[in-house]
Image (cartoon, rainbow, N blue to C red):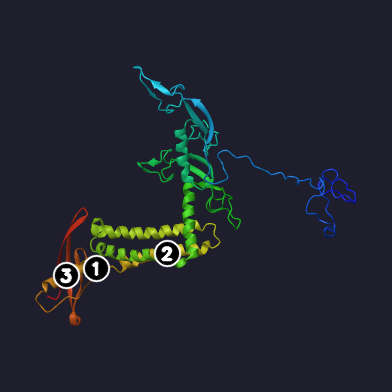
């Protein structure tokens, strides 16, 4: 005997509908049955909907929305303004009045649940929440807006907690400069690690290299990792283009090192002069760029399967930058600046003659005395001594250069 597919009640063999719920009975061979275009009776026109499926709808979690960057303030209640006692105005002794500056003349103050501590009053480090002073409530809209503005630094990150920056004590400044620990925000937000998506493990099952398995990092570190990921992805997609700027920085390193040591090997006191100060800063900046690029490759590849190859490239860039600075600087720079000055002096003294100094090469230094050779056309050369004396004045230097022949 067939049974109803909806309610399970027994159905007689010749019945076309269930006598209990009215559900049509499926025929084994529907092609042999006539299918009228219109219902022939009220019984056939009965609509029997399918049973509804239970749908689970989770309740919203206050302050911890699953959608990133969608955290909004949760309104709590309105309380009478303590400044004007709910009147909305302030009356002076002379009878004049004006709107209360605390409630802007409304009389009531809206309060909100604190999102930084989930209204518990306890911060991430088990100390009183700095945003609500441990009350769990933001006492007015102005404070609420300030909290939201601070949370904007953790844009697109899953915030799990917040605490006052221990370096600047929540001020955002240290020694009148922006605090490096919180980037001037005053509040440090703990967020899901962006390297392991908050799981604490990397793809090979080992602890995540960024959060060390804790699943959480600061919002400052998260932004740094995201930037490093961009460097690594660019390198993997187009290595040649990504290495263009590091190669340019190495070339700049060579030029800056050559100009810097050309002067320093003659007179180390020139380090404070503009002649050395500017190329010296360029030299340091280009080397710093190489180190910073290597650091980004290391940080962005912590959980990458190709991290060994990527990190090897970073180390090679730093090594190339340092070797270039050494070779182009103290190894090959020599006394180039003084040699060019000595050549100018020799040619100035030879004005009116048929001789012209083509090159000066200094090989030895003894205090203020430099010994070398002056070269002339036709393979003629002459040993010379260059005497260099200088006086320093802040970022400038005055000097005297004398060239003497050693043939006499």
Residue depicted at 24% across the width and 60% down the height = 275
168 lies above or below 356: above
Residue 58 relative to residue 12: left or right: left
Alpha carbons under labels 1 and 3: distance apart:
13 Å
Residue under pointer 1: 336
Which is nearer the eye, 328 or 245?
245
Q: Quadrant of residue 243?
A: bottom left
How far across and how far down the image is residue 78, in percent? 51, 28
Crowding near pointer 1: few (<14 within 10 Å), some, many (20+)?
many
Residue under pointer 3: 344
How far across and how far down the image is residue 266, in percent? 23, 63
Secondary structure of residue under mark 1: helix
Residue under pointer 2: 317
Q: Which mark is residue 177?
A: none
CB of mark 1 within 8 Å of CB of mark 3?
Answer: no
Crowding near pointer 2: few (<14 within 10 Å), some, many (20+)?
many
Alpha carbons under labels 1 and 2: distance apart:
28 Å
Residue 395 relative to residue 43: left or right: left
How far across and how far down the image is residue 93, in percent? 35, 17
Residue 163 relative to residue 272: left or right: right
Residue depicted at 43% across the width and 22% down the height = 84
How far across and how far down the image is residue 278, in percent? 27, 58
CB of mark 2 within 8 Å of CB of mark 3?
Answer: no
Residue 165 visible in the picture: no
Which is nearer the eye, 368 or 8?
8
Work out which residue is located at the far left of the displayed protein and give it. 352
Closer to the observer: label 1 or label 2? 2
């Amino acid at each position: 005997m067939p049974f109803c597919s909806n309610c399970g009640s027994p159905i007689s063999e010749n019945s076309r509908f269930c006598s209990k719920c009215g559900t049509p009975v499926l025929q084994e061979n529907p092609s042999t049955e006539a299918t009228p275009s219109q219902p022939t009776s009220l019984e056939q026109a009965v609509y029997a909907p399918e049973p509804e499926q239970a749908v689970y709808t989770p309740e919203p979690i206050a302050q911890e929305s699953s959608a990133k960057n969608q955290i909004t303030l949760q309104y709590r209640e309105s309380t009478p303004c303590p400044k004007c006692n709910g009147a909305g105005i302030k009356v002076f002794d002379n009878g004049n009045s004006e709107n209360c500056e605390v409630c802007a003349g409304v009389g009531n103050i809206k309060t909100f649940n604190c999102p930084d501590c989930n209204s518990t009053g306890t911060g991430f480090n088990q100390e009183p929440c700095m945003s609500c002073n441990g009350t769990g409530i933001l006492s007015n809209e102005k404070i609420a807006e300030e909290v939201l503005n601070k949370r904007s630094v953790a844009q697109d990150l899953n915030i799990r907690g917040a605490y006052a920056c221990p370096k600047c004590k929540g001020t955002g400044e240290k020694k009148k400069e922006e605090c490096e620990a919180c980037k001037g925000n005053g509040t440090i937000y703990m967020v899901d690690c962006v390297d392991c998506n908050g799981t604490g493990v990397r793809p090979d099952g080992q602890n995540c290299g960024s959060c060390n398995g804790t699943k959480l990092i600061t919002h400052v570190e998260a932004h740094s990792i995201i930037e490093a990921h961009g460097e690594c992805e660019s390198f993997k997609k187009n290595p040649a283009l990504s290495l263009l700027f590091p190669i340019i920085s190495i070339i700049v390193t060579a030029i800056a090192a050559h100009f810097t040591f050309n002067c320093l090997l003659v007179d180390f006191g020139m380090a404070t002069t503009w002649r050395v100060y500017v190329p010296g800063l360029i030299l340091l900046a280009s080397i710093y760029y190489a180190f910073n690029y290597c650091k980004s490759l290391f940080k962005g590849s912590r959980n990458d399967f190709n991290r060994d190859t990527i990190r090897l490239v970073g180390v090679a860039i730093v090594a190339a930058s340092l070797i270039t600075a050494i070779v182009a600087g103290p190894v090959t720079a020599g006394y180039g600046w003084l040699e060019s000055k000595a050549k100018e002096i020799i040619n100035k003294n030879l004005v009116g003659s048929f001789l012209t100094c083509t090159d000066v090469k200094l090989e030895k230094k003894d205090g203020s005395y430099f010994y070398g050779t002056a070269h002339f056309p036709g393979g003629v050369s002459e040993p010379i001594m260059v005497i260099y004396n200088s006086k320093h004045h802040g970022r400038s230097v005055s000097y005297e250069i004398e060239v003497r022949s050693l043939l006499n």
